[in-house]
Image (cartoon, grey):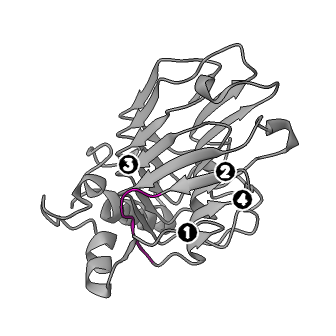
Amino acid sequence: MRIYNTNHVKFYNNIINSEGEGGAGIEIQKIGPSTVMNDIEIYDNLLYETNAAGIWITGYGAGYSKDSAKDIFIHHNKFYKTGTNEGADWAGGIVLNGFQNTLIEDNKFDGCYGAAIAHKQVSNEFSAPGSGYTTIVRNNIIINTQSSPAAGEGYAVYNQLKKYSFLYPGKQLSFSNAGGNYMSANSTSDIEADSELAAKLNTNETLGKDFPWSEAMSTGPQTPYEINESKVQTEQEESFELSLKKSFFRV
């Protein structure tokens, strides 16, 4: 799903994967100053096993003001093993550059490759003007992030761009991220899950409304992933189906 120089858009209630083909699950692209993009919302989606990033956001081209590329709101989505292409440095959960004041909150990232959330410029072609861009990250669950040969060692949050910064007004809940929680970024307010809580998160066990990250636990489409009964399932596919349900649906 892709928008290009477009505004006033909502992406919601989608289940997106790519079976090893294509690029990102959702792409948001702005080039030059001609179009304002400041009213875009992404919520209640399940993105799993996408070839590159689950969501890729990029502004680039001739100079434009930050007011014309800002305020994307990404919330209540589930990312499961997004970024399977080992050669894609823009693999991961959310990869972004060239947009100001993006807000990422109440999402669950599980098993993303490279990094769950990253500031990256995919190539020289996608260079954004200016500096001082900030992204707000709060109240997400980020777990089991995996290493990728091109995209990173498995960080929860990865800042590859010196002219960008992350802000953390809330607390992330994290554990078992192969590369650690931060690379070229830092937060002192995050919570590391203990082994008991980690086991409950891995099976998507209900933790009650008073659980600080209950919003992130209950996000995304609640309809179970549908098996095509006409297709013969291999043991690997069956294993993935069970893993998917355990990670995202109460079974």
Disc 4/disc 1 C-alpha distance (Å): 13 Å
Per the rendering, the mark at residue 164 is 2
Return the disc, 3 or 4, that comes first in the chain's sequence.
4
Disc 1/disc 2 C-alpha distance (Å): 13 Å
Return the disc, 1 or 3, that comes first in the chain's sequence.
1
Give the camera-side residue of 231 and 94.
94
Per the rendering, the mark at residue 121 is none
Q: Nearer the viewer, mark 4 or mark 1?
A: 1
Taking the magenta stretch, the answer to whether it contains residue 238 is no
- Judge the density around disc 2: few (<14), some (14-19), many (≥20) Cα neighbours within 10 Å: some
Residue 241 lies, with reference to residue 45, above or below; the image says: below
Q: Residue furthest bottom?
A: 195
The magenta segment is: 168-175
- Judge the density around disc 3: few (<14), some (14-19), many (≥20) Cα neighbours within 10 Å: few
Residue at which label 1 appears: 186
SS category of the residue bearing label 2? strand
Residue 246 lies, with reference to residue 249, above or below; the image says: below
Residue at which label 4 appears: 160
Rendered-image quadrant of the C terminus: bottom left
Given contact means CB atoms under 8 Å apart, are the residues at marks 3 and 4 in contact?
no
- Residue 60: x and y in percent read 76, 32
Residue at which label 3 appears: 227
- Residue 122: x and y in percent read 77, 47
- Judge the density around disc 1: few (<14), some (14-19), many (≥20) Cα neighbours within 10 Å: some
SS category of the residue bearing label 3? loop
Residue 3 lies, with reference to residue 24, above or below; the image says: above
Return the disc, 3 or 2, that comes first in the chain's sequence.
2
Q: Is residue 84 left or right of residue 145?
A: right
Q: Amino acid at mark 2?
A: Tyr
Whether residue 68 appears in this view of the structure is: yes
